[in-house]
Image (cartoon, helix red, strand yellow):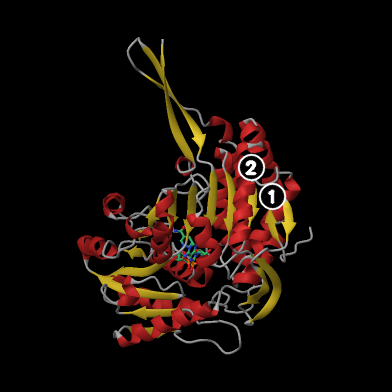
């Protein structure tokens, strides 16, 4: 399939921006432009919302749910044939190692299939009442959804929203992050090829404070499904407040990865190091705080030093590469600033900590040991390949440290004691806890944060809730 990125996809057509433009998208491995990408302004958002509304009131709403499901399946099958192309586009745009992009994007078709299979099973229930009435509920689509996605995993964030939203019967305007818009425009091509009615899915890249904010404040958008930073979510809440639309938020994390002394240390180490540097550290669920029980502390610090040296950092499009560059200059600067902060705070730099030679935004996998829980590198989301190793003594302290941040997205723990696994998992404040594994999720596992890590859940049957309204009907008999 031929992909191009210099037009917006609105109302089933490829159109030039009205008040946006076309700009270069930068390759983070070189810092140089690699392609021309269209971005939209407020007028483009207006016509995308109008197209989504028309599709919602028209063809999409009139289709039987099994017909909608069939179209989503057709799209999912097409998606599966395009994994290599999509992975290449995404890795070129955001620098993620192609082996990771392929692995991740290779699963997305199944996300869409799984939600397609639920489209015709969204029934309500009957409510026991007295004999004078018959009461029942129906579940109806929320309406037009604005989806705003981040630069680290554009296609994954889109799949997690579009799958349930389309199954529920909603129509959408997808606004990907300005730094990495290309793969979302490729996605639009697949919706077009699959034969979706015009306007069901519209894709308008654009700047957050312009196109994003306009989508959020738009009176004809019924819900915003957002993945990104907590600070942006707070702005979005204020911008959208006057319209009282619905919001769901997938936000940042600072996941604790707890290694108890009774665990299988080598397995735990490999999972902990792999997770600290996956996506070049740019993922919300990564175990960025490694809590290590004192008896195995030295062994784990040594293991981190050893595994850091084995990470192949380089061209993201090379299959042998483990870790690509940071996705853009600002993120590179942010990561390096936290390295400086870690040193100032007195943490011990075990490995990495510097930008690598060349024009690309490469940083070495970085390990700090002897980190105190209150240090900024243990409290704030760095979103770079920086692991903070924190020693602890016993379960109580582990739980206190694990819960001692504003975040509550994910957590991991490694132990050979089943009782402890249940006890500690139960007490950790997080939307998902992995025990003796890490980052294993599928379409069927609900995912989302507590505390400052978000509102609502994606994936699993729960994901549908935020795209549906429940209507109760009470009929006099
Ligand atoms: P970001 O908040 O800077 O941007 C996300 C999106 O919001 C972009 O599309 C951007 O254009 C848009 N935006 C920015 N300002 C806006 C505004 N005023 N109004 C409307 N939209 C606006 O986040 P990012 O830097 O792209 O992504 C990284 C963040 O995303 C991290 O905090 C990470 O933890 C989080 N994240 C969370 C999950 C999850 O599932 N919980 C998954 C991936 C990323």
Spatial CA span between label 2 and label 1: 9 Å
Name the spot of residue 415 as percent of width and height, x first.
33, 58
Going 72% across and 49% down the picture, which residue do you hit? 12
- The N terminus sits in image quarter: bottom right
Going 64% across and 82% down the picture, which residue do you hit? 30
Which quadrant would residue 88 be assigned to in this image? Answer: bottom right
The residue carrying mark 2 is 54
Give residue 178's mark.
none
Specify the farthest residue to the bottom: 357
Name the spot of residue 67 as percent of width and height, x first.
67, 33
Which of disc 1 and disc 2 is earlier in sequence?
1
Going 70% across and 45% down the picture, which residue do you hit? 198
Identify the element where label 2 is drawn: helix
Dot 2: few (<14), some (14–19), or many (≥20) neighbours within 10 Å? some
Identify the element where label 1 is drawn: loop
Task: Give above or below for 58 relative to 25.
Answer: above
Residue 252 in view here = no
Which quadrant would residue 397 be assigned to in this image? Answer: bottom left
Q: Is residue 328 left or right of residue 12?
A: left
Quick check: is the Cβ at mark 1 less than 8 Å away from ligand 1? no
Quick check: is the Cβ at mark 2 less than 8 Å away from ligand 1? no
Looking at the image, which is closer to me, 415 or 208? Answer: 208
Say if mark 2 contacts mark 1, CB within 8 Å. Answer: yes
Dot 1: few (<14), some (14–19), or many (≥20) neighbours within 10 Å? many
The residue carrying mark 1 is 11
Q: Is residue 205 left or right of residue 125?
A: right
Residue 170 in view here = yes
Name the spot of residue 353 as percent of width and height, x first.
44, 85
Looking at the image, which is closer to me, 100 or 140? Answer: 140
Task: Give above or below for 323 relative to 234.
Answer: below
- The C terminus sits in image quarter: top left
Name the spot of residue 204 as percent of width and height, x first.
62, 59
């Amino acid at each position: 399939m031929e992909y191009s990125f210099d037009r917006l996809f609105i109302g089933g057509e490829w159109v030039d921006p009205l008040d946006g433009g076309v700009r270069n998208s930068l390759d983070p491995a070189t810092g140089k432009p690699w392609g021309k990408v269209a971005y939209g302004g407020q007028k483009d958002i207006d016509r995308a919302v109008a197209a989504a509304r028309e599709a919602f009131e028209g063809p999409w709403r009139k289709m039987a749910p099994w017909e909608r499901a069939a179209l989503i399946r057709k799209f999912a099958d097409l998606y599966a044939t395009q994994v290599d192309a999509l992975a290449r586009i995404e890795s070129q745009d955001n620098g993620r190692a192609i082996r990771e992009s392929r692995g991740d994007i290779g699963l997305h078709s199944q996300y869409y299939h799984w939600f397609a299979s639920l489209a015709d099973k969204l029934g309500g229930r009957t409510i026991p009442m007295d004999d004078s009435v018959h009461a029942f509920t129906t579940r109806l689509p929320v309406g037009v959804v604005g989806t705003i996605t981040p630069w680290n995993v554009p296609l994954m964030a889109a799949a997690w929203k579009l799958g349930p939203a389309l199954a529920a019967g909603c129509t959408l305007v997808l606004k990907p992050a300005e730094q990495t818009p290309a793969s979302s425009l490729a996605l639009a091509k697949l919706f077009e090829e699959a034969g979706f009615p015009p306007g069901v899915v519209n894709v308008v890249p654009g700047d957050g404070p312009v196109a994003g904010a306009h989508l959020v404040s738009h009176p004809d958008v019924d819900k915003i499904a957002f993945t990104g930073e907590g600070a942006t979510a707070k702005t979005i809440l204020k911008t959208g407040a006057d319209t009282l639309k619905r919001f769901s938020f997938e936000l940042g994390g600072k996941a604790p990865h707890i290694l108890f002394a009774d665990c299988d240390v080598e397995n735990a180490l490999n999972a902990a190091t792999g997770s600290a540097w996956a996506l070049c550290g740019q993922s919300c669920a990564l175990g960025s705080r490694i809590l290590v029980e004192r008896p195995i502390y030295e062994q784990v610090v040594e293991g981190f030093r050893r595994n850091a040296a084995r990470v192949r950092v380089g061209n993201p499009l090379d299959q042998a590469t483990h870790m690509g560059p940071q996705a853009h200059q600002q993120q590179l600067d942010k990561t390096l600033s936290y390295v400086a902060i870690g040193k100032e705070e007195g943490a011990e730099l075990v490995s990495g900590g510097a930008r690598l030679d060349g024009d690309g935004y490469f940083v070495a996998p970085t390990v700090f040991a002897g980190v105190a829980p209150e240090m900024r590198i243990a409290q704030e989301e760095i979103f770079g390949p920086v692991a903070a190793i924190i020693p602890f003594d016993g379960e109580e302290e582990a739980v206190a440290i694990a819960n001692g941040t504003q975040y509550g997205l994910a957590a991991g723990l490694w132990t050979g004691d089943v009782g402890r696994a249940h006890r500690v998992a139960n007490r950790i404040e997080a939307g998902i806890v992995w025990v003796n594994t890490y980052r294993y999720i599928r379409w069927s596992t609900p995912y989302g944060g507590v505390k400052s890590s978000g509102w609502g859940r994606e994936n699993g049957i729960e994901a549908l809730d935020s795209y549906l309204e429940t209507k109760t009907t009470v009929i006099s008999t």
